[in-house]
Image (tube, helix red, strand yellow):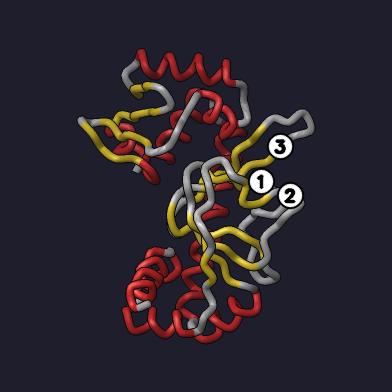
C-alpha cells in the first residue's frame, strides 16, 4: 500500500500543473482523493469519440495520445499530440478544445481524471494550480494559432519544417547532430497533421532529405539540430 501511494505521488508530480510543488503539498492533494486512476489504454484504442466524451478533465500520465477529427469523406486531420503532463477534457470553466474529436492511444497510455466538482474544489484550495492551468490552456491556444498561421501564409515545405521542428522540441533526442523524434511518423501521419495529401508530403520530404535537413527511416524522422537552434 505504501509503495502504491509513493507511485501515485510520483505520477502526480509529473503532471504539468503539479510541477514545482513540495512533497508535503503533493501529499495534501493526494489526501483530497480527487485523482482517479485507470488501467493502461492499449495502442490504437480510442479513449474518446465525438459521441463518447469524458466528463471532467483527464491527464496523460504515461504514453501518447493523438487528437484528431474526420471530415465527411473520412480524411483524418490531427489536431495535437498529448504526452506526459498534458490535459484534455471539457468543464464549464475550462475547455482544452477536445470536444467533438477522436482521441486515440499512439502507444500504451495511462490516463487519470478528475470530475468537475472535484476540480473546482481543488482549484479553490490551491490557487497556484489554477494559474498553472491557465498557462497550460494558453500554450494549447498558442499552438493552434501557430497551426492556422502556417496554413494561411507558408508554403508546404515551410509547414513541414515547422511541424517537424515543433515535434522535435517536444519529442526529440539529439543524436549525432540530429534530433530523433520519438513518434511513429509515416508520410501519411505527417499529412494528417497538415491536412494535405500523402503524395504532397512525400515530395517535400524527399527534397528535405536531399538537402540534408532531415534523415528518415521506416516511420522515424531525424531533424538537423541546427534547424532547431535557428528556430529558438
Question: Which residue is at the far right?
Answer: 72
Q: Which of marks 3 and 2 is nearer the N terminus?
A: 2
Left or right for 89, reference 100: left
Q: Is mark 3 on a helix, strand or loop?
A: strand
Earlier in the chain: of badge 1 and badge 2, it is 2
Using the rendered view, name the quadrant where residue 5 is placed: bottom left
Discs 1, 2 touching: Cβ within 8 Å: yes
Q: Can you tell which mark lies on residue 50?
A: 2
- The crowd level at tag 2 (other Cα within 10 Å; few <14, some 14-19, many 20+) is few
Instruction: Give whichever of 191, 148 is nearer the camera.
Output: 191
> Quick check: can you spot residue 68?
yes
Q: Which residue is drawn at 60% across and 43% down?
A: 79
Give the class, few, some or many, for how many residues have Cα within 10 Å of label 1's Cα (few <14, many ≥20): many
- Residue picked out by circle 3: 70
In the rendered image, which residue does mark 1 sit on? Answer: 102
Image x and y of residue 196, in percent: 62, 25
Q: Give the spatial CA distance, label 3 vs label 2.
A: 10 Å
Amino acid at each position: 500500500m505504501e509503495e502504491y501511494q509513493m507511485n501515485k505521488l510520483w505520477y502526480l508530480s509529473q503532471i504539468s500543473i503539479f510541477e514545482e510543488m513540495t512533497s508535503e503539498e503533493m501529499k495534501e492533494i493526494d489526501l483530497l482523493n480527487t485523482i482517479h486512476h485507470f488501467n493502461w489504454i492499449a495502442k490504437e484504442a480510442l479513449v474518446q469519440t465525438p459521441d463518447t466524451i469524458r466528463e471532467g478533465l483527464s491527464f496523460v500520465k504515461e504514453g501518447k495520445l493523438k487528437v484528431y477529427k474526420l471530415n465527411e469523406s473520412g480524411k483524418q486531420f490531427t489536431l495535437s499530440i498529448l504526452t506526459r503532463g498534458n490535459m484534455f477534457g471539457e468543464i464549464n470553466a475550462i475547455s482544452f478544445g477536445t470536444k467533438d474529436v477522436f482521441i486515440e492511444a499512439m502507444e500504451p497510455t495511462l490516463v487519470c481524471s478528475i470530475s468537475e466538482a472535484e476540480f473546482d474544489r481543488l482549484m479553490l484550495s490551491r490557487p497556484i494550480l489554477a494559474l498553472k492551468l491557465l498557462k497550460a490552456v494558453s500554450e494549447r491556444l498558442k499552438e493552434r494559432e501557430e497551426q492556422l498561421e502556417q496554413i494561411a501564409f507558408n508554403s508546404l515545405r515551410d509547414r513541414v519544417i515547422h511541424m517537424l521542428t515543433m515535434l522535435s522540441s517536444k519529442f526529440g533526442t539529439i543524436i549525432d547532430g540530429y534530433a530523433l523524434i520519438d513518434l511513429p511518423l509515416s508520410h501519411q501521419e505527417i499529412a494528417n497533421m497538415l491536412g494535405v495529401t500523402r503524395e504532397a508530403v512525400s515530395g517535400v520530404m524527399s527534397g528535405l532529405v536531399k538537402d540534408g535537413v532531415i534523415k528518415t527511416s521506416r516511420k522515424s524522422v531525424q531533424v538537423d539540430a541546427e534547424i532547431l537552434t535557428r528556430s529558438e
